[in-house]
Amino acid sequence: MRVTILGYGGLGRAAVARLQSQGDEVTVGHYRPLKGLPKNVAFIACDVLDAASARRACADADAVVFAVAFPYLSDVWVRDYPTAMKNVIEGCAASGARFVFADNLYMYGPQTRTLVEDMPLTRFGKKPRVRAEITRQWMDAHRAGRIRGVAVRASDYYGPDAPNSILGPFGIAPLLARKPAVLLHAPDRPHDFTYLPDFARAVADLVHGPDDAYGRAWHVPNAPTQTPRQLLEQAADLMGAQLKITVMPKPLIGVMGIFNKPLGATYEMAFQRDRAYQVDASAFSSAFFRDATPFRQGLRETIAWYRTQAKA
């Protein structure tokens, strides 16, 4: 299958590796040239904010994976995500390509129970509200018969080559340097984490999924729920380090966010941190795979990657 992946962050790179291992013909669409693409992976210049550029990137694809990640700034998300989604939808409508959205869980907003795929879309905040808006865009296009669309939703992810993970640069990397891990939330609340290669595996499964799997969202399976402290304890044990954790108070996040805009943009996402945050992936597990990577294995591979980066 000819698959075009729009976006080449951690998930984009993991999806390229997964799809290529399955024998797919993979093209990466990105707004600037990329160095070090894997052998036999093609490149196409694509600015998803330009309708003609997005249409060209989708033209020869059997499936398009929307894995675009804009800077973690609320105003940028509100301004750019709806335009990017519209342009890629139009590109898929023109080419007939399947549309696979590599998504997160923001569109549910604050919840007090386990997250399920049919929860109402939120109107809360900026980032959650815009994720709900772009969800309506692709779902409306699917219902209208203009595209075949599906979303693959992951919780906070971790793993090798996941620089935006809260467990990686703020947890594992400091521990390797014998420094305290830094968390934006209390360490003892249950919180589901998705292993990045499992996310890529789920994306690949939906790229090749049956037609009746489209028109809805699916949650990626996770290893059994643990707390951030439990996971960092395992990581510290694997690297032979002593665990120390510093928790950044919410008011301090607000103050520091005046000077650090990406940190400030996390302020409205406190609902992911001030309560249990758990995900029901039973639907996906029944239809595709249920053997999510165990945390000890995922952490071991993540630690190995960070050690490699430290030597580079």
Image (cartoon, rainbow, N blue to C red):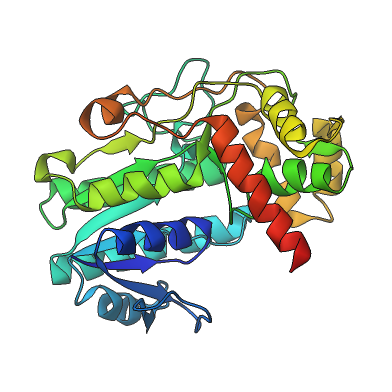
Q: Identify which residue, 102 or 34, lies in the foreground.
A: 34
Q: Identify which residue, 6 or 86, lies in the foreground.
A: 6
- Left or right relative to 302: residue 142: left
Residue 70, quarter of picture: bottom right
Residue 241, quarter of picture: top right
> x, y percentage for residue 149?
22, 50
64 in relation to 171, above or below: below
**Residue at 30% across / 77% down in the picture?**
57
- Left or right relative to 160: residue 173: right
311 in relation to 213, above or below: below
> x, y percentage for residue 115?
43, 23
**Residue at 46% across / 18% down in the picture?**
114
Which quadrant: the C terminus? Answer: bottom right
> x, y percentage for residue 298?
56, 39
In the picture as drawn, the residue positioned furthest to the top comes out as: 113
132 in relation to 57, above or below: above
Q: Identify which residue, 292 or 81, lies in the foreground.
A: 292
How many numbered discs sit on the rendered protein? 0
55 in relation to 65, above or below: below
Can the viewer see residue 265?
no
Which quadrant: the N terminus? Answer: bottom left
- Left or right relative to 8: residue 62: left
> x, y percentage for residue 171?
75, 40
- Left or right relative to 11: residue 163: right
Can the viewer see residue 48?
yes
